[in-house]
Image (cartoon, rainbow, N blue to C red):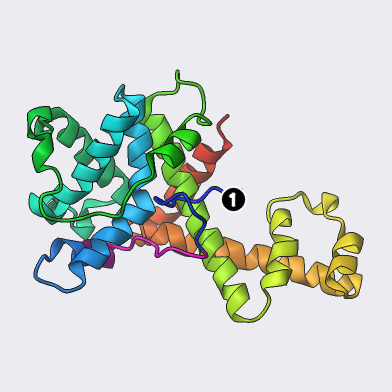
Amino acid sequence: MPTNDQTEPLGKPRAHFATTRWSVVLAARDEQSPASQEALETLCRGYWYPLYAFVRRVGHSAHDAQDLTQEFFSRLLEKHWLDAAEQERGRFRSFLVMAMKRFLANEWDRSRSAKRGGGHACVPMDTEFAETRYAQEPAATIPADSLYERRWALTLLDQAMAALRAEYEKDGRGDDFAHLKEFLVSERGAIPYGEIAASLGCAEGAARVAVHRLRKRFREVFRETIAETVTNPGDVDAEIRFVVEILSRV
């Protein structure tokens, strides 16, 4: 499942961006908190593109999609929509897309375009970058909801990969991660341990252990990433199955 696709509004690679946890959502909705703007920017950075792709797929132009997505995140605070994002309400992905649907149906008024922003500046979004990515999306016949779900799943995967990369780099094993990451989802019988050992400068047995540990830790980090987007621990396995199923679609 690994991918190099990053959810990054400026179109430039980053080593890591913060995972959207419910604590971030709660911080973002408290306008009096110094952490509010930073939390909102975390939401923007992490999840603007899945929503941008959704808005594009329902028929809006690139320019309007950028404005709509930007305005949506601004209004999360301005209109106190995050008050509805209580932990007991379930999956954050469902909350976001439903809020966007309501926004598109009821809140957007083109005549108010000069008043965009609501006083809350979001992270800039690079339309050219977004459109380059959008042009690579699956066929236009795929419904907007399905495209959003796919992009949401890829965002979680990117977050897990970024967190794992950060762990390895912190331990001084960044080169090991770079050599081994492509084997995270390879069939065991297809992993060239001899070649890996040569690239790492170690024995083949050590290469086997390194690959095993990386794959094991990735599963743990991926599970942790999924767990941070649901409120009931009992939902984690079902959400993992959902994400894997979404990523397996053509």
Q: Residue at x 32, y 63 (%)?
A: 21
Residue 49, quarter of picture: top left
Q: Residue at x 69, y 59 (%)?
A: 181
Looking at the rendered structure, the secondary structure element under dot 1 is loop
Q: Residue at x 13, y 35 (%)?
A: 113
Magenta range is 15-25
Q: Position of residue 67 (x, y in %)?
A: 24, 38
Residue 91 makes an appearance in the image: no
Q: Position of residue 136 (x, y in %)?
A: 53, 31
Instruction: Residue lying at the far bottom in this picture: please name it.
Output: 171
**Quadrant location of the C terminus in the rendered image:** top right
Task: Judge left or right: residue 155 versus residue 104.
Answer: right
Mark 1, residues whose alpha carbon is within 10 Å: few (<14), some, or many (≥20)?
few
Task: Judge left or right: residue 66 versus residue 108.
Answer: right
Q: Position of residue 152 (x, y in %)?
A: 41, 44
Residue 46 makes an appearance in the image: yes
Instruction: Inspect the magenta stretch and tell me whether residue 223 lies in it.
Output: no
Instruction: Residue lying at the far front in this picture: please name it.
Output: 114
Q: Position of residue 111 (x, y in %)?
A: 8, 29
Q: Residue at x 66, y 72 (%)?
A: 174
Residue underneath mark 1:
4
Task: Judge left or right: residue 213 versus residue 17.
Answer: right
